[in-house]
Amino acid sequence: MNFMQILDYYKRPEITTQLVENARNREVAGALRAGGFGQRPNILQFHSDVIHMVQSGVVSFHYSVERWPQPMSLGMKNYQTQRMGWDFVLDIDSKLGIEEAKIAALLVCRFLEGYGIKNYGIKFSGSRGFHIALPWIMFPKELDYQPLSQRYPEASQVIAGFIREKIRDPLTEELMKIGVKGAGETDPFYFIELEKNWSIRHMFRAPYSLNEKSWLVSVPITKDMLKNFSAECAKPENVKTDVSFFKGDENEAQQLLIDAIDWAALQKKDEPGPKRSYVNMQRIPESAFPPCIKTILMGLEDGRKRGLFVLLNFLKTVNWKQEEIEERIRRWNKLNKEPLPESIINGQLRYHENKEPVPPANCSVERYYKDIGICMPDATCKTIKNTAGYALKKAGSLRGKIEYKCSVCSRGFKNMKSLSMHQSRSHGIIQ
């Protein structure tokens, strides 16, 4: 395409409207015909911005997957605090051609639908693949009471890895069916790559942007359109703007995220290397629990989600078995003035099941205890810093002693200091 043809395409009001509307709260970069990109950061606010960038040599537009309240201030390196969210955009790129990329895209779509996700976005990359999007609205805004916006790019990488693993075998079978040489002996992602590595300020080709290599449009399509898609559909003169790429219902992909994180945790547990040592202490009964935990267990009116988070960490730390934790959490939830939805209870139980014990937040962390009105200290509270420490101390006074066992040789010790010295001297384990 020559300059005037490119300009005429971007001057189409419906194209310019789509570029500007989809660019809201995103960093925008323009690829230059001469090579490279224009200045970064940049934004699109008005129709005239699109035309100005094209007149300055831009031939294609790219968006950040991350969303920012003020994209133009990104040079400050304060990415974690500035980021307001991110979209999951999976790039499917085929070495074999569009038809093979369609096979992978359809497998991904079916996998997502298995999670009840119906509003995923699909678009042609403009070359030899497709992009599939799960926009920010589909994800919970917190995970384990940490802002999900700050868990980029690792959360995106985990979801991509999870999807890759789940479609690996079906993709191999489909490639073998169509006679791809070596499909049964080679990793299917050698032929059709599903992007798995994101970085800070990662970008992707904007919906309705031209592709400067093929001069085809990165056009959004539906799943039904995908089955019969051809390059002809992406020629500028054939493109319509009646399909949205960024759509979705609130928390539509929440379960996918939770399952992906659980899957990733299991992979890490199987990785070779030095193993951490954990103290195997006796199960501590409710009678030794601190006042704040007992208060939570009586049921809450406010702070139920934070209460659930505290209970799950606390009960696992004091060596309750998973089935005991599940039974006690469900019994607790019935005592809440308004029980938490089963989806939240089940999701958090599943998420914590495969996690190593992590002591709950220290008593000084106000948002977990004082802010929800459960901090009611007794005499023992003044001598400890953590609810788990309270339980250990109280249980010790109830039993006379607590035995700490070495996870390597099972030898017992009266206190943590003795156990640590033993593990350091006998097993080379430094806590």
Image: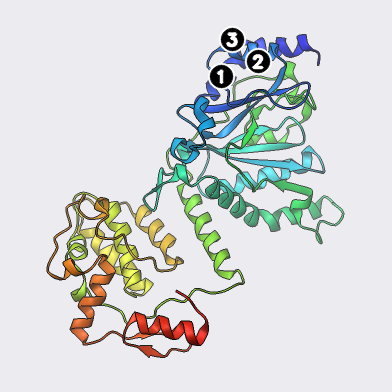
Please provide percent x and percent y for residue 125. Answer: 70, 32
Q: CA distance from mark 3 to mark 1?
A: 9 Å
In the rendered structure, which disc, 3 or 2, sits on the residue that comes first in sequence? 3
Asked if residue 135 is positioned above or below residue 147 in the image, the reply reads above
Left or right of 363 in this view: 13: right
Amino acid marked by disc 1: Leu
Taking the image as shown, residue 27 lies to the left or right of residue 70, namely right
Q: Residue at label 3?
A: 48
Asked whether residue 281 is in view, the answer is no
Residue 69 visible, this angle = yes
Q: Quadrant of residue 396?
A: bottom left
Q: Position of residue 121 (x, y in %)?
A: 58, 35
Numbered mark located on residue 44 in the image: 1
Disc 3 vs disc 1: Cβ atoms closer than 8 Å? no
Whole-percent x and y of residue 284? 27, 77
Q: Residues within 10 Å of mark 2 (few under 14, many from 20)?
A: many
Local packing at callout 1 (Cα closer than 10 Å; few below 14, some 14-19, many 20+) is many
Tag 1, which secondary structure? loop
Residue pictured at 59% horizontal, 10% vertical: 48
Label 2 near label 1: C-beta < 8 Å? yes
The one of 250 and 238 positioned closer to us in this rendering: 250
- Residue at the spot x=54%, y=68% of the render? 269
- Closer to the N terminus: mark 1 or mark 2? 1
Location of residue 431 by image quarter: bottom left
The residue carrying mark 2 is 53
